[in-house]
Amino acid sequence: GTTFVIRVPFKIDLDADKREESKDVSEKSIKGMHVLLAEDNELNMEIAEFLLQNEGAEVTKAWNGQEIVELFRKSEAGEFDVILMDIMMPIINGYEAAKRIRSLDREDAKKIPIIAMTANAFTEDRIRAKEAGMDEHVAKPIDVELLIKVIHKLVKHN
């Protein structure tokens, strides 16, 4: 067994923690938000959940369209700040799930931002997402900075 030793010189920034704290909850923060996430692919779910939690969001997971409609229906008014909706899901697809959520007889069902997440980023997909009652459309693979901007813009104006 050969042993390799690699030395990488670097300085420890003693003020890093202070700077981190002083960064006020920036314009682009989703810290403390409760996200309802629908995704049927396990790897995509894991990645999306990690990215959102890494930004300080709380995530509730749904694995298909029917489950997300049920989770929202059973939630308290205002419990969720935003819904991230995969489109291609079993049982009920994302478009149908969005329509069902929008048609629920409660105030927040009409207002909660619903963001479509799909690999299909063609104009007709965007149109279908709007027609289903979705507010925005983010293409996969997800660009986390863009997603945060979109969430922040929609939640702030909600």
Image (tube, rainbow, N blue to C red):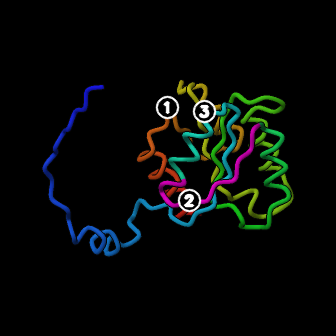
Identified by mark 2, the residue type is Ala
**Where's residue 55, x and y in %?**
48, 56
Q: Are dots 3 and 2 in contact, CB under 8 Å? A: no
Instruction: Determine crowd level at label 2: few under 14, some 14-19, many 20+ residues with C-alpha closer than 10 A.
Output: some
Label 2 SS: loop
The numbered disc on residue 57 is 2
The numbered disc on residue 45 is none
Q: Is residue 60 magenta?
A: yes
Q: Is residue 78 above or below residue 103?
A: below
Q: Earlier in the sequence, mark 1 or mark 2?
A: 2
Q: Toward the viewer: 72 or 60?
A: 60
Q: Which residues are magenta?
A: 53-63
Identified by mark 3, the residue type is Leu
Displayed quadrant of residue 110? bottom right
Identify the residue at image location x=30%, y=25%. Answer: 1
Left or right of 124, for residue 79: right
Instruction: Determine crowd level at label 1: few under 14, some 14-19, many 20+ residues with C-alpha closer than 10 A.
Output: few
**Disc 1 target residue:** 141
Instruction: Determine crowd level at label 3: few under 14, some 14-19, many 20+ residues with C-alpha closer than 10 A.
Output: few
Q: Toward the viewer: 48 or 155?
A: 48
**Disc 3 target residue:** 43
Give the distance between the C-alpha atoms of the residues marked 1 and 3, in whole angstroms.
Answer: 12 Å
Quadrant placement of the C terminus:
bottom right
Left or right of 157, for residue 16: left
